[in-house]
Amino acid sequence: MTAYWCELAWLGGERAEPGVLIECDGEWITAVAAGNAATAGATALSGLTLPGLANAHSHAFQRALRGRTQAATGGSFWTWREQMYALAESLDEARCEALAREVFAEMAAAGITLVGEFDYLHHSEALIRAADHVGIRLTLIDACYLEGGLARFRDPSAQAWAERVQAIGPGPRARMGAAVHSVRAVDPDSASVVAAFAAQRGWPLHAHVSEQPAENEECRRRYGLTPLQVLDRAGALSPRFTAIHATHIGAEDAELLEATGAFTCLCPTTERDLADGIGRPRGRFTLGSDSQAVIDLLEEARAVELDLRLATGVRGTYGAAHLARAATEDGYASLGWPEGGRIAPGALADLITVDLTRPRLAGTDPEHALDAVIFAATRDEVTSVIVGGRRLV
């Protein structure tokens, strides 16, 4: 048995609770009690303790583009994509693993305890080894990619994709997920094969959706439907489905996401970096670092709200508790770990602590601690990271 005494802890409500004692047996939380004085024998966690953060959408290899694609050239998502393709062509398995180790370590230091790696380079074992080496949890979201892009991205067919994915052994801290890369890369019949394969196994299913207006226009010309409608007809939408970006969806698509209980994953830093536009969460939403331009899920959380303020002129659409839930419990659920992302008996003992005495947060009082962390803290204030009851950072 291990015990942690938290000066403050967020247990899912609108405010942090003082003096929270968390007892763990192995990697599981067995008891949680608020209002306790510091307890002998318990490890003290000073500051605000939250559930571990879930990075719901990551392409680890794109970290190598950081600082190399921001030149003032008047480019777009499509010109950035050419630079990304050139990088992808240069990477073998060893370089992918080395990159992933560094990226996952950077995530761990930032309080990310679970990452969803949306993989189309197909070095699955390298990613699993890298996450295991660092000690964070991984959902390997293997993407079916059949048309366009680079040859190394593509499987011959959806059936060939399924056969390849079945051979992957994820390991103790890793689980599997499936992806339709996009409706540009996967035709509707093949998307149906992927969706059925994921449903049979209870896996999460992700897809890039409506990241660019041109994607919507091409899809309407080709199928007479929006990308999300194509995926819905393929049987993809369900509470296990996550629409990545969904920046340019309309009201009808938004209703479809909410009606099916699906998630939306927003990646505001990447969406700003690539000039994608400002997305609005629909239904349950999660957060991702995507291209790794910045790895800081606290920044991604507040950016959802702050970018909306710029777009709408309205403050306070999403409060701190809602944004914290997106970064924790909903992120875990979208990646196929429903037992994680919260501080409660029976949950995984994945915890992070934010130091409230650092300059950015100095003067924070307990009543406003959650708001201060979500709207002012950065990854630099994360001082403790625990995964499965084991101190990682």
Image (tube, rainbow, N blue to C red):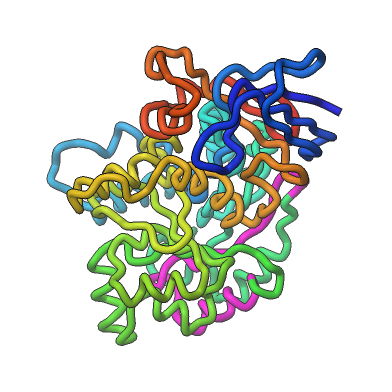
Relative to 219, is 291 on the left or the right?
right
Residue at the image point whose x is 53% and y is 75% from the top: 236
Whether residue 329 is visible here, answered yes or no, is yes
Residue at the image point whose x is 53% and y is 24% from the top: 354
| Quadrant in which residue 294 is drawn | top left
Q: Residue furthest bottom?
A: 224
Image position of 208 with respect to 5: above or below? below
Relative to 291, is 387 on the left or the right?
right
Q: Nearer the viewer, residue 175 or 162?
A: 175
Residue at the image point whose x is 28% and y is 71% from the top: 250
Q: Residue furthest front?
A: 35
Relative to 78, is 269 on the left or the right?
right
What is the magenta range? Answer: 171-198
Image position of 322 with respect to 153: above or below? above
> Which percent across, then down, holds residue 91?
48, 43
What number of labels is visible?
Answer: 0
Quarter of the image with the N terminus is: top right
> Which percent across, then down, holds residue 41?
81, 15
Whether residue 98 is visible here, answered yes or no, is no
> Which percent across, then down, holds residue 371?
42, 33
Relative to 296, is 252 on the left or the right?
left
Q: State yes or no: residue 187 in magenta.
A: yes
Q: Nearer the viewer, residue 213 or 305?
A: 305
Q: State yes or no: residue 166 in magenta.
A: no
Residue at the image point whose x is 47% and y is 75% from the top: 259
Quarter of the image with the C terminus is: top right
> Which percent across, then down, holds residue 144?
53, 67
